[in-house]
Image (cartoon, coloured by chain):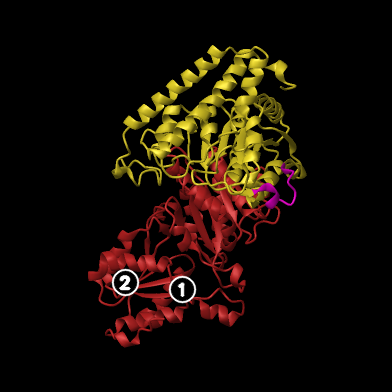
C-alpha cells in the first residue's frame, strides 16, 4: 500500500480506520437527521476525503493550531472534538461547540486550538498566517495547519497568504484538498495551470502532491512536513488528490460530473483502500471490523440522544458574544 | 506648554504602546522604511526594529487578516491601512472574520486587533483616496469604530482601543495630521465610547465627528457673533454610539444639525437623525438638518472637491435657517 508502511503498526492502522469510519458514519447519520429536519442550513459532507483530515491530524500536537473550511466535520472529529458537542452544534443547541451560533459550517473549540469552520473560500488562510506569526513572535513551538479546497486556489487571499507565509518564514502547513471541483466547476474550467502544488512552489514553499485517498501516505507526508517546519524550515504545502463522493451540499443534482467518474473514484476510496489492505495482509479480522463499526454506531447514537435532549440557547442570550462582556462590578 | 501636531500625537500613542507591551506591533504598507504614507510612523523603525514595525506587501486582505490572526494568537497588533479606500480590499477579513468570529464561535475567540486607517478629502486625491466610510464600518455588529478629532484623542484613544478585547477601527482624517494644539492631560480624556461636548450652547446642537469637528467649531464661533449659541457634540465613537449624550444635548437645545463628511444616503448622519427622531422627537423645535457631502465620488479639481464637502459657510447658513420660524417650502427634498 505504501512506502511508509514500515512506520506504522497494526494498532495504529486500526485507529486510523476507526477515525475514518467515525467521520463517515457520523455524516451518514447527519444526512438522515437532515432529512428528518433535525439538522438544517447547509450540510457539506466530507465523504471520500476522510483520509486527509485523519492522516494530517496524526502529525499535530495539542499545541498546534488547526483551521478548516465549511466542510469540516471530519477535521473537528479527527482533531478531538467530541461527537456530542459537534452533533449538538448541528442541532443548534446551547451545548454545541459554538453555542448553536455556528452550525455545520462553523465548528470551533479554542481549547483544542480548533479555529473553525470558515465559510468564505480562502478566508481562513490570512488568519492562519496571523496565528502562525503570533506563535513565532511568542516563541511557541507550534505549527498552524490550514485546510482548504482547490476552489480556494482561485482566490487572491490564497496567493497573498502563501507569499506572506514564505516571506516571514512561518511555521505553517497548508493542506489543499483537491477534490477536482469548486462546488460544480471543474478544476480545468477554473485554473490556467491545474498543478496546484506548483503554484505553492512558485512562492518558494516546500510543496508536494500526494494521494489523498491513502491515509498512511497522508500521515507520512504530514509528519515529514511538520518535522521540517518544527525545525525551522518554514511553511510547507501538501496538495492531496481526493474526491467528494456525494454532492457539494444537500442540494446538488451533480449535473457537472458523470456517474462513471464517481464510481471509479469510489473504488479508490480511503475506507475501502485501507480495509482491503488490512484484510489482504491479514491485519484485521472481520469481528474486529465489526467491533469498530459497533463502537462507532454506539458513539453516534449517544451523540444524537444527547443532542436531542440538550437545551436550546435562551433567546434572551441572542446578543451575547457580539462583544466581550465587561464586568461592571 | 508646547504644541504638538495630530500626527505627532498619533505617533506618540503608537510608540507608547510599543514600549509598554511587547505583544504590540505595527504592520502596514510602508510603515517602516518609508516612515508611513502620512509620516505617522516615521522614526519608529529605528526605535523598535523590523520585528515590531513590519512593512507589509500590497496585500490588504493578507496582512489585515494576518493582524486578525495574530490577535487571535495572543498578540496586540496595530494594523495600518494606508487609506480607507484600500480597506475595501480587506473587507472580507474585517467583516467576515474580525467582526464575526467571537459570536460565531459562541464566545470562544477574541480578536483584540486595532486597525487604523487614514480617510477623508481635502488633498485633491480624487475618488479612490478621499472617502469617508466610517458609516459602513459602524454598521457592523462586532466592530468598534473610533474617529478622533482632537490632539488629545489622537494621543490617547489608541491605548483605549488596544485595551479593548474586541476589534477596533480607528479613522484618522488626512486634513487633521498637521493640526497643532497643546496636548491635554491624559486624565482629561473621556472614555473611548463616550461622546464629548466640545462647546456648550443653548440654541442648537451641531453633532459631528472626526474631520468635520473643526468646521463645526469654526461655524459655532462665527454663529456666536450672529447671536446664535451653538453646542458642538463630538461623537468620537461611532459604534457603539453614545445616544445618551446626543439626546441630552438635543433635549437642552431643541435643535439638531448633523455634519458628516460622508454621503447622506444610508450613512452615519442618517443613523444619528433616526436616533433623534425615534427617541427625541418631542424635544425638537425644528426639523433635524444635515450638512453632508454631495452624492458624488470625490472629484480631483480643487473647486469641485471643495464644493462636494461640508463647508463652514454651509453649516452657518443651515444653522441660521434653523433659528428662523419653520417654513416647509424652503426645504429642498434633494
Q: What x and y, as percent, mark residue A301?
A: 40, 25
**Residue B150 shows up from this direction:** no
Total residue callouts: 2
SS class, disc 2 = loop
Asked if residue A310 lies left or right of residue A285, the reply is: left
Residue B3 or A90: which is nearer the viewer? A90
**Placement of B260 over or under A181, stated as above or below:** below
Q: Which residue is mark 1?
A: B215
Label 2 resides on the chain identified as B
**Residue B189 shows up from this direction:** yes
| Residue occupying the point 49% across, 77% down | B294
Looking at the colours in the rendered structure, which chain would you say is drawn in yellow? A
Give the numbered dot on residue B22.
none
> Image quarter for residue A246?
top right
- Give yes or no for residue B282 being in the magenta stretch: no
Q: What x and y, as percent, mark residue B29?
A: 65, 55
SS class, disc 1 = helix
Asked if residue B204 lies left or right of residue A180, the reply is: left
Read off the magenta span.
Answer: A186-196
Residue A17 or A281: which is nearer the viewer? A281
Looking at the colours in the rendered structure, which chain would you say is drawn in red? B
| Residue occupying the point 45% across, 31% down | A29
Residue A270 or A194: which is nearer the viewer? A270
**Placement of A190 over or under B229, stated as above or below:** above
Q: Which residue is mark 2?
A: B201
Which part of the image, by quadrant, shows the C terminus of chain B? bottom left
Asked if residue A220 lies left or right of residue B324, the reply is: right
Residue B38 or A316: which is nearer the viewer? A316
- Give yes or no for residue A193 being in the magenta stretch: yes
> Image quarter for residue B122?
bottom right
Amino acid at each position: 500500500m505504501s512506502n511508509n508502511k514500515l512506520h506504522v503498526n497494526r494498532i495504529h492502522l486500526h485507529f486510523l480506520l476507526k477515525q475514518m469510519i467515525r467521520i463517515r458514519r457520523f455524516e451518514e447519520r447527519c444526512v438522515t437527521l437532515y432529512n428528518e429536519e433535525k439538522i438544517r442550513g447547509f450540510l457539506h459532507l466530507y465523504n471520500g476525503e476522510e483520509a486527509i483530515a485523519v492522516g494530517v491530524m496524526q502529525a499535530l500536537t495539542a499545541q498546534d493550531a488547526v483551521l478548516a473550511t465549511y466542510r469540516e466535520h471530519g477535521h473537528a472529529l479527527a482533531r478531538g472534538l467530541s461527537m456530542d458537542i459537534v452533533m449538538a452544534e448541528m442541532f443548534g443547541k446551547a451545548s454545541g461547540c459554538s453555542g448553536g451560533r455556528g452550525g455545520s459550517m462553523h465548528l470551533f473549540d479554542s481549547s483544542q486550538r480548533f479555529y473553525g469552520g470558515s465559510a468564505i473560500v480562502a478566508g481562513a488562510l490570512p488568519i492562519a498566517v496571523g496565528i502562525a506569526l503570533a506563535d513565532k513572535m511568542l516563541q511557541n513551538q507550534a505549527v498552524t495547519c490550514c485546510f482548504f479546497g482547490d476552489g480556494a486556489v482561485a482566490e487572491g487571499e490564497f496567493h497573498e497568504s502563501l507569499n506572506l507565509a514564505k516571506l516571514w518564514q512561518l511555521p505553517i502547513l497548508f493542506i489543499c484538498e483537491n477534490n477536482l471541483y469548486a462546488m460544480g466547476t471543474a478544476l480545468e474550467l477554473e485554473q490556467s495551470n491545474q498543478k496546484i502544488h506548483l503554484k505553492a512552489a512558485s512562492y518558494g514553499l516546500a510543496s508536494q502532491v500526494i494521494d489523498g485517498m491513502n491515509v498512511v501516505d497522508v500521515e507520512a507526508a504530514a509528519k515529514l512536513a511538520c518535522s521540517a517546519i518544527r525545525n525551522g524550515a518554514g511553511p510547507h504545502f501538501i496538495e492531496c488528490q481526493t474526491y467528494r463522493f456525494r454532492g457539494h451540499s444537500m442540494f446538488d443534482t451533480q449535473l457537472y460530473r458523470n456517474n462513471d467518474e464517481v464510481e471509479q473514484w469510489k473504488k479508490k476510496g480511503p475506507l475501502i483502500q485501507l480495509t482491503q489492505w488490512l484484510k489482504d495482509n491479514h491485519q484485521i479480522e472481520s469481528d474486529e471490523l465489526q467491533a469498530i463499526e459497533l463502537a462507532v454506531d454506539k458513539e453516534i447514537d449517544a451523540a444524537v440522544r444527547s443532542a436531542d435532549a440538550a437545551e436550546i440557547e435562551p433567546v434572551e442570550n441572542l446578543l451575547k458574544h457580539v462583544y466581550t462582556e465587561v464586568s461592571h462590578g | 506648554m508646547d504644541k504638538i501636531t495630530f500626527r505627532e500625537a498619533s505617533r506618540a500613542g503608537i510608540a507608547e504602546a510599543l514600549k509598554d507591551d511587547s505583544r504590540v506591533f505595527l504592520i502596514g504598507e510602508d510603515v517602516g522604511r518609508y516612515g508611513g504614507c502620512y509620516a505617522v510612523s516615521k522614526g519608529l523603525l529605528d526605535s523598535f526594529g523590523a520585528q515590531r514595525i513590519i512593512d507589509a506587501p500590497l496585500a490588504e486582505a493578507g496582512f489585515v487578516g494576518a493582524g486578525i490572526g495574530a490577535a487571535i494568537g495572543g498578540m496586540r497588533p496595530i494594523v495600518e491601512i494606508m487609506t480607507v479606500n484600500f480597506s475595501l480590499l480587506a473587507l472580507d477579513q474585517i467583516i467576515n472574520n474580525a467582526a464575526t468570529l467571537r459570536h460565531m464561535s459562541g464566545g470562544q475567540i477574541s480578536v483584540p486587533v486595532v486597525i487604523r486607517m487614514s480617510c477623508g478629502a481635502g488633498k485633491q486625491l480624487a475618488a479612490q483616496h478621499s472617502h469617508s466610510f466610517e458609516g459602513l464600518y459602524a454598521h457592523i455588529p462586532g466592530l468598534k469604530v473610533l474617529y478622533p478629532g482632537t490632539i488629545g484623542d489622537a494621543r490617547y484613544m489608541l491605548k483605549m482601543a488596544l485595551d479593548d478585547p474586541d476589534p477596533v477601527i480607528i479613522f484618522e482624517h488626512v486634513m487633521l495630521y498637521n493640526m497643532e494644539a497643546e496636548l491635554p492631560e491624559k486624565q482629561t480624556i473621556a472614555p473611548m465610547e463616550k461622546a464629548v461636548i466640545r462647546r456648550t450652547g443653548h440654541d442648537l446642537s451641531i453633532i459631528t465627528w472626526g474631520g468635520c469637528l473643526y468646521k463645526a467649531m469654526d461655524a459655532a464661533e462665527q454663529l456666536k457673533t450672529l447671536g446664535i449659541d451653538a453646542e458642538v457634540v463630538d461623537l468620537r465613537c461611532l459604534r457603539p454610539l453614545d445616544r445618551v449624550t446626543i439626546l441630552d444635548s438635543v433635549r437642552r437645545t431643541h435643535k439638531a444639525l448633523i455634519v458628516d463628511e460622508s454621503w447622506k444616503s444610508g450613512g452615519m448622519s442618517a443613523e444619528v437623525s433616526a436616533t433623534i427622531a425615534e427617541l427625541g422627537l418631542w424635544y425638537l423645535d425644528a426639523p433635524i438638518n444635515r450638512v453632508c457631502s454631495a452624492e458624488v465620488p470625490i472629484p480631483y479639481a480643487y473647486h469641485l472637491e471643495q464644493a462636494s464637502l461640508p463647508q463652514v459657510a454651509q453649516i452657518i447658513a443651515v444653522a441660521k435657517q434653523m433659528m428662523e420660524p419653520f417654513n416647509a417650502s424652503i426645504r429642498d427634498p434633494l
